[in-house]
Amino acid sequence: MARVFDSAVSAPFELPPGEFSAFIFDCDGTLADSMPLYHRAWQRALDAHGARFEFTWELFMSRAGMSTALTVEGLNREFGTLLEAEKVERHHHAEFLALIETVQPIHAIVDVARSYFGKIPMSVASGGSRPLVERTLELIGVKELFPVVVVAADVARGKPEPDIFLLAAERMGVAPAECLVFEDGKPGLLAAERAGMKSVFVDRGSRN
């Protein structure tokens, strides 16, 4: 079970029990307070491509950490739509790029990363695209903390499958069981569990 950490509460952070040799951080909603921006970009892209359902915050967060393509496929199954994943993805990325310059860090989690920098290996494992993830890390001032950045395109299966976390562990040279994952999305928490890793749930609740 994941330890729950409320990102809106300013309090000393304590790691879950256990020995950890490496940390793996999700990017959006964990290191960066970018989920409201992504939600807005999703709404605009879906509306532009004729979606007839409301893409609510709850619906959005239920897919947090999943790739754009997998999200569109899931929405098509759930709502009986025929949205074209590639077209929606291009539109979504363009909308997010128009908003990205306003992104802010989630300070409590960034502080954890900064405090362990140089002490243990750390990486980012995100369901986003590499250009957006790397630009986000740059804007919130943490890009230099993470020599390993793994994104959806690097693996055959995205979250909730464990591939992305297993690849991050491999590239850090650390056994999966020795890694601690920081995540804000349920698919990511499930991916960590399937990878044999403990996790911290960075809870945004219903804040959007």
Image (spheres, grey):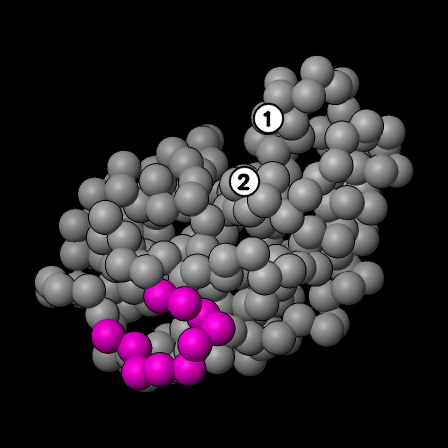
In this figure, which residue is indicated by the disc labeled 2?
A: 63
Pinpoint residue 194: horizontal percent, then vertical percent.
27, 37
Q: In the rendered view of the protein, which quadrant contains the C terminus?
A: bottom right
Residue 105 spot, x, y in % from top left? 55, 75
Front-most of residues 208 and 182:
208
- Left or right of residue 158, residue 19 in this image: left
Q: Residues within 10 Å of mark 1 (few under 14, many from 20)?
A: some
Q: Residue at left 77%, top 59%?
A: 97
Q: Which residues are magenta?
A: 5-14
Query: Could you tell me residue 98's position as x and y percent?
Result: 82, 62
Q: Position of residue 164 (x, y in %)?
A: 40, 44
Q: Is residue 102 above or below residue 39?
A: below
Which of 43/57 is in front?
Answer: 57
**Residue wearing tag 1:** 74
Q: Residue at x 56, y 56 (%)?
A: 206
Residue found at the far left of this picture: 18
Question: Viewer-proximal residue, 93 or 1?
Answer: 1
Question: Label 1 is placed on what type of residue?
Answer: Gly
* Dot 1: element: helix
Considering only vertical position in the picture, is 57 above or below 124? above
Work out whether residue 28 can be spotted. no
Marks 2 and 1 close (CB-CB < 8 Å) = yes
Left or right: where 31 falls relative to 81? left
The reply to whether residue 196 is visible in this rendering is: yes
